[in-house]
Amino acid sequence: TDNGMLWLTAPGEASNTISIVDIAQRKRTGVIDLQTYRRPHGIDRDPRTGRRVVTVENPDGLLLVDPATRKIVRYYALKGGTPHMVKLSADGEWAYCSNTKTGVLAAIRLATGEVKPIAVGARPQGTVLSKAGTMLYVPSSDGNAISILGTRKQPGGGEVPTGKGPTRPRPPRDDDLAGIRGVIDDRVERHRAIADGAHAIADVAQPVEEIHLARVPAW
């Protein structure tokens, strides 16, 4: 996405396009014009349809975009302000947007436009689904915790405390485990990691950049 601003909190109209890049050729091969919707940020792909969901910061909302036609399919107004990252549910029915200024995760049913605001920690960041797609992990960089939400019955779940500033989780590699990366002030603090279902906690010694977990017999 071509946001055009370094910080999402900075004022300004900025850009209103999405670049299509050929990775093999390492060049831009197309552009999707978002018209009056500016400052695109987070993006995710529906593997069933190939459509993209894209957060925009001016006005605050979510776009459903068809890259085949390079057109906007639908705009969704969000209840929460300053949408940041977005994650689609495993079945593509719901989109989950982190709204950083209000500590709200907006769950949007794409077919109907229904929006469910879910309170999470302060400054929610990028989210990740469990491998089964039944749990959603939401790190909150100012809340120093990870909210755990059930995708089948929202909100559900609980919260796991972490070190300072958890930001971008990595998709789980084995079973339903999520590795959490937390970076603040250019240093990496103490981390915790969680196991899906039982929400077991394991402390990880610092310094580390990223955590990748595998299921162990004790869990």
Image (cartoon, rainbow, N blue to C red):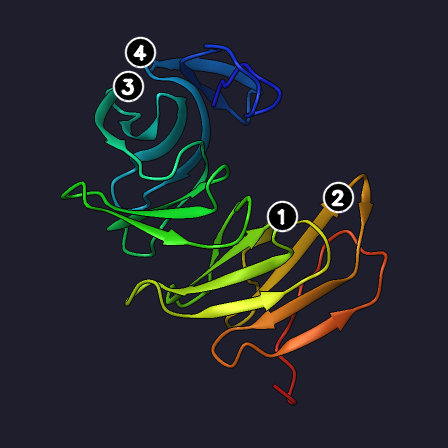
Q: Residue at x 45, y 65 (%)?
A: 131
Instruction: State the image coordinates of residue 56 (x, y, percent, origin top left).
Output: 39, 25
Determine the CA span between mark 2 and mark 1: 8 Å
Q: Say which label, 2 or 1, has the lower sequence index.
A: 1
- Of residues 30 and 99, the one drawn nearer to the viewer in this rendering: 99
Q: Say which label, 1 or 3, has the lower sequence index.
A: 3
Instruction: State the image coordinates of residue 81 (x, y, percent, origin top left).
Output: 40, 33
Determine the CA span between mark 4 and mark 3: 15 Å
Camera-side mark, 4 or 3: 4
Q: Say which label, 4 or 3, has the lower sequence index.
A: 4
Tell whether 190 sits left or right of 43. Answer: right
Badge 1 crowding class, 10 Å Cα cut-off, few under 14, some 14 to 19, many 20 or more, is many
Give the structural element (helix, strand or loop) at label 1. loop
Determine the CA span between mark 2 and mark 4: 34 Å
Res. 36 mark: 4
Residue type pointed to by label 3:
Arg
Give the structural element (helix, strand or loop) at label 3. loop
Q: Residue at x 45, y 10 (%)?
A: 13
Q: Say which label, 4 or 1, has the lower sequence index.
A: 4
- Residue designated by label 2: 184
Determine the CA span between mark 1 and mark 3: 34 Å
Tell whether 13 sits left or right of 182. Answer: left
- Residue designated by label 1: 141
Residue type pointed to by label 4:
Thr
Q: Residue at x 42, y 70 (%)?
A: 157
Q: Say which label, 2 or 3, has the lower sequence index.
A: 3
- Residue designated by label 3: 70
Camera-side mark, 2 or 3: 2
Residue type pointed to by label 1:
Ser
Quadrant in which residue 60 is drawn: top left
- Say whether marks 2 and 1 touch (CB < 8 Å): yes
